[in-house]
């Protein structure tokens, strides 16, 4: 599950020229940072692990992880016949960072004092062999609470570090961070950035983690989460699911296209789940097809939905289902009023493009901002959220303009 951020306000005098040329303003790759996969053992050793010490203790202790997930200390547990092993704590490494000034806010921020300011770190189980890191098909998304002052300091630190490492021009749309990819994880930028992150994340301000992983021979993806307070963990109730469910799944089926479904089914008014089964979608009425397609666009729109208003599986499937099943049905997002848009004076239209491939050529990639095997995925929901964050912080948060 991923965070949602604040929509831009309209009361700023920030100009188009400022946004496109001022290196002191936030860019897409400042507020959402995807690290490259390591190409050497030294680079692999430079990743942050959940056991790395930050504010008040480890970023995510094995004790908390095991307590929440029910694993035995040191890992263990079985996925059962035909399944994958559960995510192993010892294998987790940080692959992405998100900065969010107003988590789960929908629409313009009307009272910044009520915003949930957050730093989030995405960990994945990584292995290193044959001079490259490879990611297992799963992720752990860890949430840290910040004050607005802390968030402002962190964000301005990130921007300054980017400038110090040659990033004085627009780095463009979200991608593996261009400077980190060029320097590698042993370069000056990651050294400075990783040291700075540890000033803002740790046991003292850890509030939640969510996880997803595949099982049953790459056919099922399950989602759950845990709130953390005073060293205790509580399972998250997932929105829009019946019976206060704390886990949901998507099963892709065994056909060439989507041939499975969601368990449990959502109760959401914006229900895109018809698109998760291509054959059923093709048999449906035109109005039902369009309604599901519109719902998928709305789920990806941070002005309409947040992680508090939609279930995890629908959120992760909205992009691939809209793109792939939509294409099968001949439905396009072009001109659709449900699709997210942002003022090009605040974020360039080209910076809002999706650069990662959404298809089934290497199997289904349900990641939002991380890797499957060696393949990065940056979902449109994350791109839309990131654009909203950039617009908002440049108008309302950055003090060093």
Image: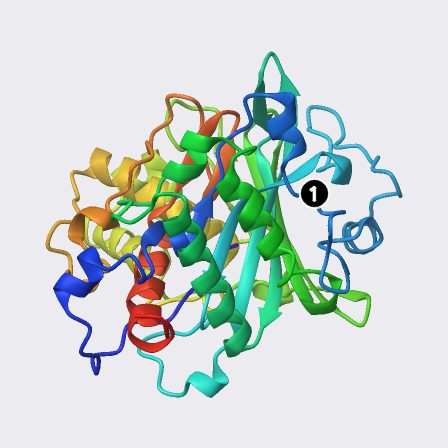
The residue sitting at 77% across, 51% down in the picture is: 65
Write down the quadrant of residue 361 in the picture: top left
Number of numbered discs on residues? 1
Vertical order, 2 against 186 (above or below):
below
Write down the quadrant of residue 20 in the picture: bottom left
- Which x, y percent locates residue 60? 73, 53
Vertical order, 71 against 30 (above or below):
above
**Residue 267 in sight from this viewpoint:** no
**For residue 259, side relative to residue 58 (left or right):** left
Vertical order, 354 against 37 (above or below):
below
**Residue 396 in sight from this viewpoint:** yes
- Which x, y percent locates residue 133? 58, 24
The foreground one among 269 and 144 is: 144
The residue sitting at 28% across, 67% down in the picture is: 391
Q: Mark 1 = which residue?
A: 49
Q: Quadrant of the C terminus?
A: bottom left
The foreground one among 276 and 357 is: 357
- Which x, y percent locates residue 63? 85, 53
The residue sitting at 82% across, 66% down in the picture is: 231
**Residue at the extreme left of the image, as rendered:** 335
**For residue 134, side relative to residue 359 (left or right):** right
**Residue at the extreme top of the image, as rendered:** 130
């Amino acid at each position: 599950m991923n965070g949602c951020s604040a929509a831009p306000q309209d009361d700023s005098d920030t100009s188009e020229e400022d946004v496109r040329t001022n290196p002191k303003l936030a860019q897409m790759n400042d507020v959402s940072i995807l690290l490259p996969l390591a190409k050497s053992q030294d680079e692999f050793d430079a990743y942050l692990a959940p056991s790395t010490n930050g504010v008040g203790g480890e970023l995510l202790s094995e004790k908390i992880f095991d307590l929440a997930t029910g694993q035995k200390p040191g890992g263990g547990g079985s996925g059962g016949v035909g399944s994958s092993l559960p995510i192993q704590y010892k294998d987790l490494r940080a692959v992405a960072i998100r900065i969010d000034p107003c988590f789960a806010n929908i629409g313009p921020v009307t009272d910044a004092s009520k915003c949930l300011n957050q730093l989030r770190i995405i960990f994945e189980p990584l292995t290193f062999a044959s001079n490259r890191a490879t990611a297992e098909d799963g992720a752990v998304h860890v949430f840290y609470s910040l004050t607005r002052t802390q968030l402002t300091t962190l964000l301005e630190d990130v921007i300054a570090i980017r400038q110090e490492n040659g990033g004085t021009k627009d780095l463009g749309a979200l991608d593996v961070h261009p400077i980190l990819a060029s320097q590698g994880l042993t370069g000056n930028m990651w050294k400075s950035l990783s040291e700075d992150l540890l000033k803002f994340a740790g046991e003292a301000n850890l509030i939640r983690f969510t996880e997803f992983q595949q099982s049953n021979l790459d056919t099922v993806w399950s989602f759950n989460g845990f709130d953390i307070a005073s060293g205790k963990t509580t399972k998250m109730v997932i929105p829009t699911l019946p019976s206060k469910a704390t886990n949901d799944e998507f099963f892709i089926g065994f056909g060439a296209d989507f041939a499975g479904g969601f368990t449990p089914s959502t109760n959401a008014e914006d229900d895109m789940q018809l698109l998760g089964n291509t054959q059923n979608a093709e048999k449906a009425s035109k109005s039902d097809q369009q309604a599901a397609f519109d719902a998928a666009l709305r789920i990806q729109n941070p002005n309409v939905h947040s992680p508090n208003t939609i279930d995890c599986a629908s959120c992760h499937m909205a992009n691939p289902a809209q793109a792939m099943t939509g294409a099968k049905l001949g439905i396009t997002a072009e001109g659709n009023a449900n699709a997210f848009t942002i003022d090009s004076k605040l974020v360039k239209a080209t910076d809002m493009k999706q650069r990662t491939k959404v298809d089934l050529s290497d199997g289904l990639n349900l990641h939002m901002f991380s890797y499957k095997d060696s393949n990065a995925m940056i979902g449109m929901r994350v791109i839309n959220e990131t654009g909203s964050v950039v617009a908002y912080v440049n108008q309302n948060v950055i003090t060093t303009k």
